[in-house]
C-alpha cells in the first residue's frame, strides 16, 4: 500500500485540549466552537452518559467523537469505552458520520471518470482508486481475475495520478484509447515491463478528468492506493485501503474464489 502524508495524527494533536470559555451568542459551547475553527465538521449530536452531550464530527473524512462535559465549558475528544470494552462512540459515528458520508462518496464515484473491468451484469461493483504505477493496485488486479472472469464482479477503476510523474500520462493513455477497458487490461498484463506507454502532453480535458479523480480521492480523506469501495453483505458501503488478502479479499469480493 502506498500511503501519502496522512493527516489524522496532526488532527489528534490539534484537538486534544480543553477550553474554559462560555457558549457563544448562538449557544454553541466554546469547546465545540473552538474545534470547528480547527477544521472539524459537525454532523449531529447524540445521547451520552454521565450528563455529557455527544457530538459526531469528522476531520478530513475521519470520524471523531466529542463529549461535552456538564456545564459546557470543557470537552473530551476520542472513544468512550464501557465496562465490557465496548466502544460507545462506534454506533453514533456510524449512523451520523460514516454511513451518510459513504453514501455521498458512492454517488460521487458513480459520476467520476472510471474504466470498467468486468461485466456490466456483474453481481457486485467495486470502485477502486487506481494509480497506473501502483504495484499493489496491480497485485489486486491479478488477485481479482477469477471473480472478474466468472462475471461476479466489475471493478470500476477511478484513475489517479499520485505516485510518479508518469502516473497521469499513463492514466491519460488509458482514457484516450478507443477501448479504455482493453487498454487498462494491456497495461496491467505488461505491468512488469512498464505498462502502457505514457501519453506525453495529454489533452487538457483528459488531464482535468484525472486531476478531478485525484482531488476526489483527497477530499474523501484517502491517501493510499488501492482504495476500494464496495457494498458488504448487509448492503452497507465499506472501504478497504491497501491490498486485501485472505478473508479480507473474500469480504471485498463478496464470495469465495470461483
Image (cartoon, helix red, strand yellow):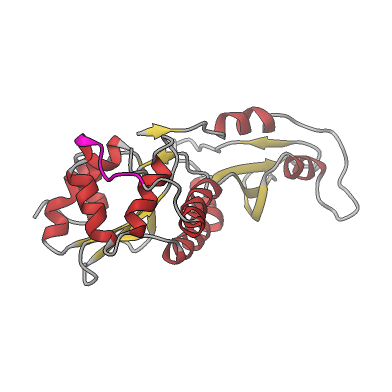
Q: Is residue 195 left or right of residue 161?
A: left
- State whether residue 70 is above or below residue 19: below
Along the viewing direction, whichever of 3 and 231 lies nearer the viewer: 3
Residue 145 appears in the picture as rendered: yes
**Magenta-colored stretch includes residue 117:** no
Q: What residue is at 19 percent from the left and 40 percent from the top?
A: 246
Q: Position of residue 211 (x, y in %)?
A: 51, 50
Along the viewing direction, whichever of 70 and 162 lies nearer the viewer: 162
Snapshot quadrant of residue 21:
top right
Residue 130 appears in the picture as rendered: no
Residue at the right extreme of this rendering: 25
Snapshot quadrant of residue 152:
bottom left
Residue range of the region highlighted in magenta in the rendering: 192-198
Residue at the left extreme of this rendering: 258
Q: Is residue 154 left or right of residue 1?
A: left
**Which quadrant of the rendered structure holds the N terminus?**
top left
Q: What residue is at 67 percent from the left and 44 percent from the top?
A: 40
- State whether residue 115 is above or below residue 187: below
Q: Is residue 254 left or right of residue 256?
A: right
Q: Is residue 242 left or right of residue 194?
A: right
Q: What residue is at 22 percent from the left and 67 percent from the top?
A: 123
Residue at the front extreme of this rendering: 201
Along the viewing direction, whichever of 151 and 99 lies nearer the viewer: 151
Q: Position of residue 54 (x, y in %)?
A: 65, 48
**Which quadrant of the rendered structure holds the C terminus?**
bottom left
Q: Main secondary structure of the magenta part?
A: loop
**Magenta-colored stretch includes residue 194:** yes
Residue at the bottom extreme of this rendering: 121
Q: Position of residue 98 (x, y in %)?
A: 50, 53
Q: What residue is at 51 percent from the left and 37 percent from the top?
A: 81
Snapshot quadrant of residue 232:
bottom left
Amino acid at each position: 500500500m502506498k500511503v501519502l502524508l496522512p493527516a489524522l495524527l496532526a488532527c489528534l494533536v490539534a484537538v486534544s485540549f480543553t477550553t474554559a470559555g462560555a457558549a457563544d451568542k448562538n449557544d454553541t459551547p466554546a469547546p465545540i466552537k473552538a474545534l470547528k475553527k480547527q477544521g472539524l465538521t459537525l454532523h449531529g449530536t447524540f445521547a451520552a452518559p454521565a450528563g455529557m452531550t455527544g457530538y459526531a464530527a469528522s476531520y478530513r473524512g475521519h470520524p471523531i467523537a466529542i463529549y461535552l462535559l456538564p456545564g459546557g465549558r470543557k470537552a473530551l475528544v476520542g472513544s468512550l469505552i464501557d465496562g465490557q470494552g465496548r466502544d460507545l462512540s462506534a454506533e453514533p459515528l456510524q449512523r451520523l458520520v460514516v454511513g451518510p458520508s459513504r453514501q455521498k462518496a458512492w454517488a460521487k464515484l458513480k459520476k467520476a471518470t472510471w474504466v470498467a473491468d468486468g461485466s456490466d451484469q456483474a453481481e457486485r461493483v467495486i470502485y477502486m482508486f487506481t494509480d497506473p504505477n501502483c504495484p499493489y493496485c496491480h497485485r489486486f488486479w491479478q488477485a481479482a481475475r477469477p471473480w472478474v472472469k466468472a462475471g461476479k464482479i466489475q471493478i470500476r477503476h477511478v484513475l489517479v495520478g499520485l505516485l510518479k510523474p508518469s502516473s497521469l500520462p499513463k492514466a491519460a493513455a488509458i482514457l484516450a484509447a478507443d477501448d479504455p477497458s482493453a487498454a487498462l487490461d494491456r497495461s496491467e498484463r505488461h505491468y512488469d515491463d512498464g505498462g502502457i506507454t505514457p501519453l506525453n502532453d495529454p489533452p487538457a480535458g483528459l488531464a482535468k478528468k484525472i486531476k478531478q479523480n485525484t482531488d476526489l480521492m483527497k477530499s474523501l480523506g484517502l491517501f493510499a492506493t488501492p482504495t476500494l469501495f464496495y457494498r458488504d453483505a448487509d448492503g452497507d458501503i465499506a472501504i478497504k485501503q491497501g491490498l486485501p488478502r485472505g478473508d479480507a479479499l473474500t469480504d471485498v469480493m463478496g464470495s469465495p474464489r470461483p
